[in-house]
Image (cartoon, coloured by chain):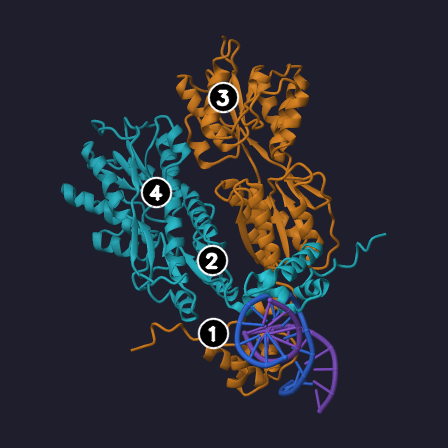
Chain colours: A cyan, B orange, C blue, D purple
Amino acid sequence: MPADRGRPPAPPTISEVAAEAGVGRATAARTLGGYGYVSPELKERVLAAAEKLGYRANALARSMSTGVSHTLGVVVADIGNPFFAGMVRGISDASRARGFDTIVLSTYEDLDEEIAATNVLIDKRVDGVIIASAAVGRGEVTHIRTALERGVPVVLVDRAIGSLDLDTVVIDNRDVAREAVETLIAAGHRRIGFVWGPPVAQAPTTRRALLSAAARNVWTDGERLRGYLDALDDAGIPFDPELVMVGPKTEEHATEEVVRMLTLPHRATALFCTETDAMTGALRAVRARKLSYPGDLSLIGFDDSAWAAVMDPPLTMIEQPVHQLGAKAAEVLLDPLEGAEPRRETHTLHARLVMRSSVAPPPAL
Amino acid sequence: MPADRGRPPAPPTISEVAAEAGVGRATAARTLGGYGYVSPELKERVLAAAEKLGYRANALARSMSTGVSHTLGVVVADIGNPFFAGMVRGISDASRARGFDTIVLSTYEDLDEEIAATNVLIDKRVDGVIIASAAVGRGEVTHIRTALERGVPVVLVDRAIGSLDLDTVVIDNRDVAREAVETLIAAGHRRIGFVWGPPVAQAPTTRRALLSAAARNVWTDGERLRGYLDALDDAGIPFDPELVMVGPKTEEHATEEVVRMLTLPHRATALFCTETDAMTGALRAVRARKLSYPGDLSLIGFDDSAWAAVMDPPLTMIEQPVHQLGAKAAEVLLDPLEGAEPRRETHTLHARLVMRSSVAPPPAL
DNA sequence: CTGTTAGCGCTTTCAA
DNA sequence: TTGAAAGCGCTAACAG
């Protein structure tokens, strides 16, 4: 009866391999670690012994003495969001290609989680960290400063933080947002709803107030709002606070807000949705009001997906280069690790408006 | 001019804290590690010193000497799939609640990646591993055996492996699949297409061949196919190989296969899609053939989503308890770690068929 | 209750 | 070229 109860034998260490091969620890370490000189014969013996014992290096011990882990940490806002999932894949593909493992932690948009996650990464001695931060207001970035002070390089991705002089990889949110809204305006719309607004209770009545409310929130949200306002300004369309969603950023609430915008005396005839859930929420409202698009209402949303393409009619959407975004972030983090000078600049990638069939001229009301 | 160039000062160690506080290392270690007895006064001084120096324990050193890391490893097939993303969240919520960090690695359905990922986790000395495996045939599970031999407990999630006597948490794929197909049959359908089949070049002509091809692939696929066949059998409907998709499991190919099924002399009047992408692929085919659902064709798919609910008409879908699946896996892994007897059994959770409007009687052809 | 000492497994001088 | 020995930061026996 095999010793099923007692815990399994401890994994073999380098000393055991050395003993088995009849050489000193250092020699075994050198051949197994792939550094220094070892004669072919001894190398042979060590390899055989390692094979026989099923030796695998203890990564912990190794990073303990070398000080490097060949591991990158990634902190994202929500791994359940296909946008971040795609970005993470870009990061891990790029880092693996350069011999780095990546460990990812999701904060679900909670700042405390973000701080905890960053600390976990620091404590585990990763060689660098990539963060899509939920922190915006200055003063909430001490966890990032802490990382920096301890010598852990960090690069920001998707969400910039102005107060930090860091390498940052983002998408031209403001420009595409403007392009999307311009597309709507070009089709003849003047009553354009902005669907994922700042999560404040009351609709700010002035542009300034609105912008500052947005600025206090997620960085991308603020940029997209700016793009919306840019387009309105260029076309000489006055900003109407009733056309921007406020309150919790949930699909349910988006539906409520869109229903509100659609029942206004001078209702919205087009919607610009800044997130996937904002779009599905809007679609529910359209259905609830027994309206159809693009006849009664035009639609443009952020984050293209297979679903958006199979909707009937297919939705005009903004496609972000998610994989490339992650790959670039990894590159920017790894280059300095491998000797390059840190750049400390902002790298901007371009999103693309994918024209389909959810935009048409506004109905005569 | 601050030393910007030279690398930042090394993070403070416990010895430095001890020195600063004027106590021995052990005392500092005891108060900072939260074990053993320390007088209130000394504790006070140590805490102050730690605070002052910005001390954070080195997790590597700690696990090095204790042998535990309070970290769980998770290996999933594709973190970009909302199903796995949701499951991962269930795992991390549950483990964090019990004081464990989790690090997740995605294999993108590649067995070599799965092996590499598992090894990374073993090498980093995680306390346990949760795997949604891409390996099915026996003989490809040596990486899992290796983990076990080295004393790393592993639990399987979503995808069972019969040849391994391990705790496993899955969903009743076969039963829901059967329920879905029965629903179609009850509506009057007899020509029901099965959309995500085994990735073989030629359609197997016998049930046996089909099943064994599926069994060689992802576990869930085989189960869902069995459920499909179960329903057919119960209704006395003969199995027709032309109604099951074969070839690469991609959205594009699903479209091709569905187009094929829809142009058969005796065409499919209903489709059972086993994955999200299979459904979007099918929807493209429906559009291409200028058909509409549920009038011309009934549809049921796996993995409910916000999109499925806003389609027009909304889709009848199978909703899997993803969060619960992950939470249960974490529980099953952690319980033995905290002293409970390992169970080594299969835990089955139930998926739910969400009735909406994509099923109707077949058209008169 | 506190300090000293010996490891954890690996890398890395430094002699031999 | 190879081996002995020190050290990474922490925990854990063991004295005191």
Instruction: Please give the name of the residue rendered at 28% of the width and 48% of the height, measured from the top-left corner.
Output: A172
Chain on which label 2 sits: A
Q: CA distance from mark 2 to mark 3?
A: 41 Å
Q: Are discs 3 and 4 located on one and the same chain?
A: no
- Mark 4 surroundings within 10 Å by alpha-carbon count, few (fewer than 14), some (14 through 19), many (20 or more): many
Of mark 2 and mark 4, the one earlier in the sequence is: 2
Instruction: Please give the name of the residue rendered at 61% of the width and 65% of the height, measured from the top-left corner.
Output: A29
Q: Are discs 3 and 1 located on one and the same chain?
A: yes
Give the residue at mark 4.
A320
Which kind of residue does numbered mark 4 sit on? Answer: Gln
Q: CA distance from mark 2 to mark 4?
A: 23 Å
B337 or A43: nearer the viewer: A43
Give the residue at mark 3.
B257
Chain on which label 4 sits: A
**Tag 2–tag 3 contact (CB < 8 Å):** no
Residue A12 x, y percent position in the rendering: 69, 61
Mark drawn on residue B11: 1
Of mark 3 and mark 1, the one earlier in the sequence is: 1
User: Is residue B206 something that shows in the picture?
Assistant: yes
Give the residue at mark 2.
A72
Q: CA distance from mark 3 to mark 4?
A: 29 Å
Q: Are discs 2 and 3 located on one and the same chain?
A: no
Instruction: Please give the name of the residue rendered at 44% of the width and 56% of the height, measured from the top-left corner.
Output: A110
Q: Is residue B68 above or below residue A89?
A: below
